[in-house]
Amino acid sequence: MALEIAPLVVSLVYTARFRKFTRINKLLHWEKLAKNALFLSVFLFAVNVIFQDGEMLKWIWHLFLVALVVVPLQQRELRPLRMFIVAFIPFVVVGLLSDLTEAISSGFFNANESYFKNAIGLTYIWLVAILYSQNRQNKAAEKERIRRMQEDELNRAIAIRKVELEALVTERTAELTKQKEELELTLEELRATQSQLIQSEKMASLGELTAGIAHEIQNPLNFVNNFSEINTELITEMEEEIDKGNLEEAKKIARDILENQQKINQHGKRADSIVKGMLQHSRSSSGVKELTDINKLADEFLRLAYHGLRAKDKSFNASLKTDFDSRLGKISIVSEEIGRVILNLLNNAFYSVSERKKLKMEGYEPFVTIVTRLVDDHVEIQVSDNGNGIPQKVMDKIFQPFFTTKPAGQGTGLGLSLSYDIIKAHGGELRVETKEGEGTEFTIVLPC
């Protein structure tokens, strides 16, 4: 089977990064080997393209990739690259196992080819995620280094300036008036410097957001990694059972592999949703405001949210109540963003009533209400439900990024935070009132 372009790209990325590290750290021996490995990657791929389906070349390629990750791991001077090297191990192992399985049992491989492809695809996702994370960490470390250098330079400048001022006061005591003006000017400079330092401390709090991102995305990635390792072991066991002729046991193992694969897929999607949520949260809106019918927008997203939940759970039902103010005309908003806010609040409301419905309380009938009002110089959009409500102890956290009251794995904690930022950017306000065990009401306030 001819080599594909993707493994070549991966090996080129690996050897290029490896060579850069050795060059920066002046590891001349390893830099030379990295350069040779880079040329060898291109050479192997070129030979493969020329001869096509070279079976021997394929195994040479696998041995080459194994050597690329195994040999450096054993070297003390390359320890700073350990996490980078480890990130490539799943790619190398899964690719090797795939070709070994095809060589040992082509029938089994053909029957399960899609799973092998999915596993290889997950190694690419894992690789990209690790490289992205390391790149962010490197950038953060560089920013921190620059910030500290700037602070040191600033502190030295302040210290030098202070010495100069003391000398100036000592030397020019007689010129009190002039000296007073100079000291006042210097004091203003020091205050400005102090404000800059305070702002730097505030910026440091952004590190908490980075920690939250790392924590949120690490969990599903751990699941993907763990289940991938288990599948690797199960494949080995299945091959042994097939060799023994015990097909029933092999089928049981295959079902276990399928279940693990589904879990890998589930947690992969979970990681994907977190990344998309982060991108939404960090992206500044470029939308253009336009005159929009709020009543129509609210009604549209009410139906969208309800039928979206019904598509996931056919047994779910709830009463939909609306009260749209007919006096409302069109107002200038970014309709996509306000629609996203309304949809998020409605999704939360439907989730709350569906969870309370599961408690099977006697006489409980779930309902969700959306109301629009024209009040003086602003518009109010209220979304309320008779679900479980929000505990008072967490009310001051609900608009914080990555905070969620949903069970682990069911929410990213970015919805309300993103909604709050969108409404604030429109010059409005997002309020919440709740009673635990009775329901919640969110109110969007927008200027006309």
Image: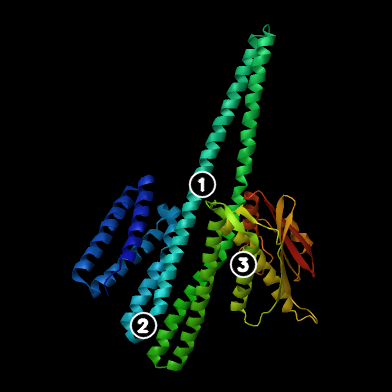
Name the amino acid type tagged 1. Answer: Ala
Residue bearing mark 3: 301
Mark 1 and mark 3 lie on one chain; the one further toward the N terminus is 1
Q: Quadrant of residue 203?
A: top right
Residue type marked 3: Phe
x and y, in percent, of residue 202 in the image: 63, 42
- 20 left or right of 291 in image: left
State the image coordinates of residue 229 (x, y, percent, origin top left).
48, 73
Q: Dot 1: within a 10 Å radius of its alpha carbon, few (fewer than 14), some, or many (20 or more) residues?
A: few
* Numbered label attached to residue 109: 2
Q: At x 40% / y 85%, what residue is drawn?
A: 239
Estimate how packed mark 2 is, as few (under 14), some (14 to 19) or many (20 or more) residues with alpha carbons within 10 Å.
some
Q: Are marks 1 and 2 in contact (CB under 8 Å)?
A: no
Q: CA distance from mark 1 to mark 2?
A: 45 Å
Residue drawn 71% across and 52% down?
378
Camera-side residue: 40 or 276? 276
Q: Closer to us: mark 3 or mark 2?
A: 3
Q: In screen coordinates, is 281 left or right of 373?
A: left
* Placement of the N terminus among the 4 image quadrants: bottom left
Sequence-wise, the earlier of marks 3 and 2 is 2
Under circle 2, the secondary element is: helix
The residue positioned 52% from the left and 51% from the top of the image is 286
Secondary structure beneath label 1: helix
Mark 1 lies on residue: 141
User: Amino acid type of disc 2?
Assistant: Phe
At 47% across and 54% down in the image, what residue appears? Answer: 134
Is residue 25 visible in the rendered image? The answer is: no
As helix, strand or loop, the secondary structure at mark 3 comes to helix
**Image color mode:** rainbow
